């Protein structure tokens, strides 16, 4: 819901609204329903609205509460806003709108910076408190909603995407060598606060940030994930019963916080099918959407999951829409999709979500999606493999997950970008944080709090909001994640992973969907690189811009171009596509404004 941007000046100057307007133009696709800007002393805000809750002008933003002397721009949804609103009314607050935006203002006034601890939802917001002349920013526990910023001695700027900050100008667009190492080691994950650009940062999940007009800055982490067993031992049935209760409550929260119809992105896998099953009795004529792609001619990988999504749609009699997209359209639309990536995203399904989002946005404004279930409930094949591996915790993780080892990284990039094995250091530090009982507890917590934020969650938000479509992720409801984190890992990994969800789904959705092998969101042409796609990547990597930029060693590039299908990552991604995607993103988003 929406795109936000703004500026706080430290030098006594008034923000230039023409800059805010340029920034706002770069977030326009996130909010097609309303546009506005405000300026108040050293602060200016811009907002693009996607109207989902309280569709009236009363809920337009930037929202200004003149009585409380607080202004706000907000992206996201507070799922428990009605309960909080009722509590605040009991406390004496009067409301002029019916939505969740005003609840944030009143909650901040009532409870201060700790208000975020009471929010159930996904959110990124900036709040100007005129009483104290402070700017307060916050991001939800799992970073479902993005919040980027740039900072120098004169000003602080923030936005929902990197493109808006680049449009404002004055950003250091040199490559962060540490972030580059993370990007090429953790399949495009660059943990906050870094991004691939030295001059752009992102607010970490579960974090607030406070700034004054004098340039004083402070951060606070307001939530962390406990991955230890509870004091009272629970039986398998106790855990399954608790999972059912909490998941149903989470799905209801995500469905009900909307004044417009809500659909489901139905991949044909367990997670999205389970969402359909839990919603079907509560939503009349439930809308479901599936996408498939053309294979590459030799059956190397099945390019759609219609076999399963059709079964679910038929079983629950949904109003189903399925879209088959030819490879010619994928290639034609790649520049457009990459231009809308806030950061470089190498996963094949980023493009898939972009093309699906375009079609779904013609039907609804809000969809539920199954992202997060694999990370939270241990659904990926590498979790049990890591568990059985030998060596240190770092080695068990690294040998089954890293896209390339450090030696190959040094072979890939030019010496100017060489750094020590910073990703191994970061991962080891994360795994050894306290409040995790076992190695798998450490891994699953790291995945849920870091990797999922910067990979599936980021690309789903980016690629759907590019079409003014809000994707909600009930499996990342923080109560559900907290429950799963304390559950014994062996229970989650039972029967091939995600056992609690499989048990909950049994008897609700077709057995064929529950018992099928784990599927992915495949775009085979971006994995088995041939023909026009190979030529496309060759053109990018042999371009003058790429050679001049000097990130990659040419011998490594030529090795991948000579036999791209021989060079896949441990989790079966194309290494050639990784290189081409980063260079293409830089050409489209950085070079274009330089």
Image (cartoon, rainbow, N blue to C red):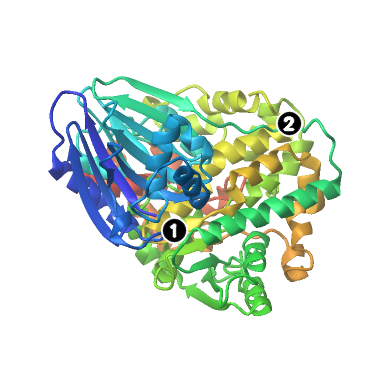
Q: Where is residue 449 in the image (x, y as percent from the top left)?
A: 57, 37
Counting the numbered discs, the total is: 2
**For residue 470, which numbered disc appears in the image?**
1
Q: Nearer the viewer, residue 447 or 263?
A: 263
Residue 226 coordinates in the image, percent (x, y):
66, 32
Give the residue drawn at x 74%, y 71%: 510
Residue at 29% across, 54% down: 60
| Residue 98 visible, this angle | yes
Residue at image location 16% in from the left, 35% down from the top: 15
Compute the Cα span from label 2 to label 1.
33 Å
191 left or right of 274 in image: left
Residue 490 appears at what percent x and percent y? 80, 42
Q: For the residue carrying disc 2, how many other residues have a C-alpha within 10 Å: few (<14), some (14-19), or many (20+)?
A: some
Image vertical order of residue 451 relative to residue 523, above or below = above
Q: Which residue is drawn at 48% across and 29% down?
A: 410
- Label 2 belongs to which residue? 228
> Which of pointers 2 and 1 lies earlier in the amino acid sequence?
2
Task: Determine the image quadrant of residue 174.
Answer: top left
């Amino acid at each position: 819901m929406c795109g936000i941007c703004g500026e706080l000046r430290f030098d006594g100057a008034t923000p230039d609204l023409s800059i805010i307007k340029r920034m706002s133009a770069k977030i326009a696709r996130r909010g097609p329903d309303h546009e506005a800007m405000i300026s108040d002393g050293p602060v200016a805000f811009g907002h693009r609205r996607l109207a989902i809750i309280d569709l009236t002008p009363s809920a337009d933003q930037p929202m200004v509460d003149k009585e409380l002397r607080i202004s706000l721009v907000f992206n996201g949804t507070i799922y428990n806003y009605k309960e909080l609103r009722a509590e605040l009314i009991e406390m004496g607050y009067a409301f002029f709108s019916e939505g969740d935006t005003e609840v944030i203002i009143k909650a901040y006034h009532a409870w201060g910076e700790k208000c975020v601890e009471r929010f159930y939802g996904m959110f990124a917001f900036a709040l100007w408190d005129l009483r104290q002349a402070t700017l307060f920013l916050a991001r939800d526990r799992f970073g479902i909603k993005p919040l980027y910023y740039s900072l120098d001695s004169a000003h602080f700027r923030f936005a929902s995407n990197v493109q808006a900050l680049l449009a404002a100008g004055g950003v250091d667009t040199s490559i962060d060598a540490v972030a580059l190492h993370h990007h090429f080691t953790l399949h495009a994950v660059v943990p906050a606060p870094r991004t691939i650009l030295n001059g752009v940062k992102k607010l970490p999940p579960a974090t607030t940030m406070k700034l004054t007009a004098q340039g004083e800055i402070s951060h606070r982490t307001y939530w962390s994930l406990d991955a230890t067993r509870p004091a009272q031992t629970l039986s398998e049935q106790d855990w399954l019963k608790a999972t059912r209760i909490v998941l149903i409550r989470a799905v209801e929260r995500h469905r009900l916080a909307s004044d417009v119809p809500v659909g489901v992105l139905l991949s044909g896998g367990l997670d999205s099918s389970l969402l359909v099953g839990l919603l079907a009795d509560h939503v009349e004529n439930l809308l479901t959407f599936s996408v498939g792609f053309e294979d590459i001619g030799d059956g190397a990988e099945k390019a759609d999951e219609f076999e399963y999504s059709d079964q679910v749609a038929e079983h629950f009699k949904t109003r189903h829409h399925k879209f088959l997209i030819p490879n010619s359209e994928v290639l034609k639309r790649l520049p457009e999709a990459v231009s809308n990536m806030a950061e470089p995203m190498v996963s094949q399904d980023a493009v898939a979500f972009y093309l699906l989002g375009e079609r779904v946005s013609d039907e609804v404004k809000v969809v539920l999606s199954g992202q997060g279930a694999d990370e939270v409930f241990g659904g990926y094949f590498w979790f049990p493999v890591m568990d059985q591996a030998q060596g240190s915790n770092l080695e068990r993780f690294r040998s089954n997950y890293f896209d390339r080892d450090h030696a190959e990284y040094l072979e890939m990039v030019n010496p100017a970008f060489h750094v020590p094995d910073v990703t191994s250091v970061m991962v080891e530090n994360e795994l050894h944080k306290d409040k995790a009982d076992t190695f798998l507890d450490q891994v699953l917590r790291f995945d849920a709090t870091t990797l999922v934020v910067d990979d599936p969650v980021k690309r789903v938000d980016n690629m759907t909001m590019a079409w003014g479509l809000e994707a909600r992720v009930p499996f990342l409801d923080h109560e559900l994640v907290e429950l799963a984190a304390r559950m014994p890992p062996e229970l989650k990994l039972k029967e091939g992973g995600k056992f609690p969800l499989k048990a909950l789904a049994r008897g609700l959705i077709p057995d064929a969907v529950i018992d099928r092998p784990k599927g992915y969101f495949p775009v085979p042409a971006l994995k088995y690189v041939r023909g026009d796609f190979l030529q496309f990547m060759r053109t990018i990597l042999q371009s003058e811009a790429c050679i001049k930029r000097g990130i990659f060693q040419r011998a490594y590039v030529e090795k991948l171009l000579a036999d791209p299908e021989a060079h896949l990552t441990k989790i079966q991604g194309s290494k050639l596509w990784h290189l081409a995607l980063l260079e293409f993103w830089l050409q489209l988003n950085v070079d274009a404004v330089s």
